[in-house]
Amino acid sequence: MSDNDAAVAYGNYLKIDELLSLQHPRSEGPEHDEMLFIVIHQVYELWFKELLHELDRVRTLLEQDEPHRVQHTLKRVLTILKVMVAQLDILETMTPLEFLTFRQRLEAASGFQSDQFRQLEFTLGIKSEHAIARFQPGTRARAALERRYREPTVWDAFLHYLAREGYTVPPAHLHRDPTVPVEPSPDIQTILVELYRHDTKNAELCERLVDLDEGVQEWRYRHVKMVERTIGTKRGTGGSSGAAYLRTTLAQPIFPDLWEIRALL
Ligand code: HEM
């Protein structure tokens, strides 16, 4: 195969021409920093896609009673999350004034409208009907969100797995409405304390879920700090109060029971 053929295969397989044609700055000139802003958001959307792909795998592997493979997949998820947090450093090289050179051209566009981010939240158990209503009926985003809203979360799959491992998970938890956000439960905490004391394999698995939870919280924290240093107390382009709104999302654990039990051990 000649170098030329290899290049054609690479480009065809990865759709490089299409990929490189997807960055369209809106500012006049265009302003230099807008390219970074577009590229980094597109990169995040690709990582969101990959995370959803891997979390679907985590759920399936839990359903198939494959705890070691679940841990393996969670390790990949965590590694991606770390890269996602680190990537915020790149955007922080953009000063407030550089951002202002094109900010008004974003109009109402905001990460607020990332359906894949909401899909991730839904898959992890942070469900909100209100969040679905922001997306137009009939769009890909709306359909994907409605589907994930009704689907069991990673935590639901984990509780079913624990029941099959012999833990007496109350039926109310196994047959709960998956559209309701996951709330802390003293019954589940009692099971988890027992598990942490006597079941190393599953305790390790729980620790990887805590890593995942902490990783998402870390991303939220770094994002709000970046927002504070870039736009301060200004409102967001998506219409929220900006950093003040984002700070309300910080103390929102994904798996609250796994945090509650620390004090009980
Ligand atoms: C200069 C860079 C950025 C600024 C100033 C910024 C600002 C904001 C603000 C103010 C909000 C609150 C919603 C609103 O009213 O707009 C928000 C939400 C959000 N942003 Fe950013 N952002 C930036 C970069 C990014 C990047 C690179 C991503 C990656 C995809 C991102 C993802 C999100 C997400 C997912 C939300 C919704 C968070 C939630 O509702 O919990 N942002 N952003």
Image (cartoon, helix red, strand yellow):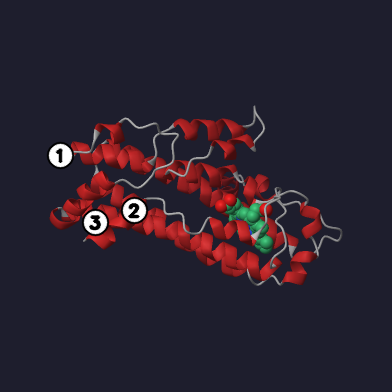
Nearest the viewer among 164 and 85 is 164
Q: Quadrant of residue 88?
A: bottom right
Q: Earlier in the sequence, mark 1 or mark 3?
A: 1
Crowding near the residue tagged with mark 1, few <14, some 14–19, many ≥20 C-alpha atoms within 10 Å = few
Q: Residue 193's mark?
A: none
In front: label 1 or label 3:
1
User: Can you tell me whether the CB of the residue at mark 1 lies under 8 Å from the nearest atom of ligand 1?
Assistant: no
Q: Quadrant of the C terminus?
A: bottom left
Label 1 – label 2 distance at C-alpha: 20 Å
Q: Amino acid at mark 3?
A: Glu
Q: Is residue 173 visible?
A: yes
Q: Position of residue 68 (x, y in %)?
A: 24, 49
Nearest the viewer among 21 and 217 is 217
Q: Amino acid at mark 1?
A: Gly
Q: Secondary structure at mark 1?
A: loop
- Name the residue that disc number 3 marks: 204
Q: Secondary structure at mark 3?
A: helix
- Name the residue that disc number 1 marks: 166
Q: Position of residue 113 (x, y in %)?
A: 64, 45
Q: Earlier in the sequence, mark 1 or mark 2?
A: 1
Residue at 65% across, 72% down: 93
Q: Decide if residue 127 is on the left or right side of residue 107.
A: left
Q: Is residue 208 visible?
A: no
- Name the residue that disc number 2 marks: 209
Q: Secondary structure at mark 2?
A: helix
User: Can you tell me whether the CB of the residue at mark 3 lies under 8 Å from the nearest atom of ligand 1?
Assistant: no
Q: In the displayed structure, would residue 3 be above or below residue 113? A: below
Quadrant for ligand 1 reads bottom right
Label 1 – label 3 distance at C-alpha: 17 Å
Q: In the displayed structure, would residue 177 be above or below residue 75? A: above
